[in-house]
Image (spheres, coloured by chain):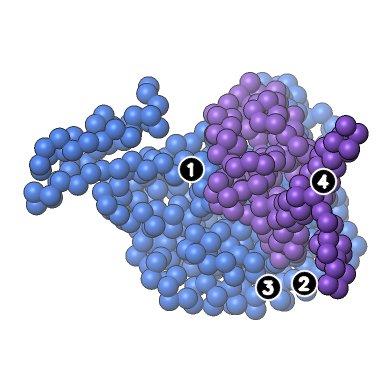
Chain colours: A purple, B blue
Amino acid sequence: MALDRLTGDNSIVFIRSEQLFDIARTNSLWYMAFGIACCAIEGLMSASGPRFDFDRMGVFFRNSPRQADVMIVAGTVNLKMAETVRRLYEQMPEPRWVVAMGACASTGGPFREYPNVVMGVDKVVPVDVYIPGCPPRPESVQYAFLELRKKIRAKTEDRLAARRQK
Amino acid sequence: MSDPRTTVTTPGLLAEGTHDPGTPPAGIKRAPTGVDHLATEHLVINMGPQHPSTHGVLRLLIEVDGEEVVTVEVSVGYLHRGIEKLAEHRRFNAIGTLMDRGDYVSGIHGETAVALAVERLMEIEVPRKAQWLRSLAAELNRIASHLVWFGTFGLDTGGMGQFLYAMRDREAILDILEAITGQRMMFNYARPGGVVADLPVGIDEKIRAFCDTFDTYLDEHHALLGGNEIFQGRVKGIGIIDAEKAFAFGLTGANLRGAGVDFDVRKKRPYDAYPELDWEVPLGSAGDAWDRYMVRMGEMRQSARMIRQLIDGIPEGEHTAKVPKVLRPPAGEIYACVESSRGETGIHLVTDGGDTPYRMHYRAPSIFALQAVEDIVPGHLIADTVMMVGSTDVMLGETDR
């Protein structure tokens, strides 16, 4: 939903402020440059590389959690790392979203038998989108961002619908 | 042991000229403070585990005196996921999947080390074609891994362009590797006895086309990053690891060859197809970051040269030896090593006659390089810390295993 599609030439658009914010948010989902393991190479490096180029979707990396909207948990989270993941999540400004990338971040993956490994990052931070695969291809990560966009919009629309019913 | 993050933030000036830096955090060795009656306050800076230049989840505790680093302590373990222990519960065919995720940028080398160890224990005769296919995949993967290093090393110095060019070429390699092995990163291609599959039809033209373009691309890469005067000024004379120090820390790979030591596992303990190939070992002299950069650039060129010979001379035959589905090596002990992108990657297997190893040790070159980082960083500036960590090409997946 881009604004120019809503507006013709010299027309006035009536839009709820929540929806306006959603347009801005969904088109600039900046993720935090925070790679833990193997998935970071696919989900963060190839993603910002020339072939997949997430930048054209407005998805770009920020080095500080204070400037980021999305945290891609790309890799195995162990007990030593879990504390840091939680701290980084709390440093991100709201609204914030978390993408659990790969088998390890979703469930513990091939390392889940090891007692040190957290069985999915959802034990530590709330997760919005899970991506299967070990590692997922960059296309999967792109798809995850599209799903995240839908989720953000749906939340506002649900809220507006509930308000209308009142 | 107290938590360094809570204890480091309590410095305070006591009186004029004297300064009590407080209790040092765990492992930090304080240097004497105060020069010419001017007391300076030492700060302990935490770098990582979330930091764009730590190449994964490395954490550095840096004690600085102004801009100058006094001591540095490397904190590892943020990616410890028990590869060695889990390998005790995997069949010998499946250990490769764990090794892929150890050194995740160049997975094929770890797999080959496991395969070599099991083959030597079981005395399996590997077909010549399988050896050539392994070497082919290994050299392709070496270029891909060095390109990642090249791109991120440039990012550490503040460049962005070389990263995009490096990733472009890496994607071309990954396409080839995906066609050969079926996966972009986690191949599980080299198995005990040979490789999983033969080359797909028509891939040799793709590989040749890649080799033809890659030599010119490599010149471009080098001109873009190595030809930059700012880059040269930042890496030349930085982080000198001379031969003696390199031996003391047990460094291998480009970190050792940058100091001028001619040690390459592919030459000294030949395996797979390497004895039959014609190539050279690039060497540095001083052992600074620039030498390590030049050695890795030279290695990429040599790898491309090897790939051309490998694809031209692929022998006929089977791609795998006849091996049973469940491998049961006799009880014994073996060490097998390969030259991975980062140095000597070794596997020490102890078997008890069962279908899983009794104990597996993973010799990862990066953890040795990190020990050297602790030694070379003090005395340099904060910004150079990033350069030195980048120049040793550490991979935290294999460090923490």
- Quick check: do tags 3 and 2 share a chain? yes
B108 or A68: which is nearer to us?
A68
Residue hosting label 2? B208
Per the image, label 3 sits on a secondary structure element best described as helix
Residue hosting label 1? B48
Image spot of residue B83 (x, y percent)? 63, 31
Residue kind at label 3, given as amino acid type:
Phe
> Is B352 on the left or on the right of B199, as rendered?
left
* Circle 2 crowding by C-alpha within 10 Å: few under 14, some 14–19, many from 20: some
Who's the residue at 30% across and 43% down the image?
Answer: B43
Mark pair 3, 1: CA separation: 35 Å
Residue hosting label 4? A153
Image spot of residue B273 (x, y percent)? 69, 57
Location of the N terminus of chain B by quadrant is top left
Residue kind at label 4, given as amino acid type:
Arg
Residue kind at label 1, given as amino acid type:
Gly
Who's the residue at 76% across and 47% down the image?
Answer: A18
Residue kind at label 2, given as amino acid type:
Arg
B117 or B157: which is nearer to us?
B157
Which chain letter matches label 3?
B
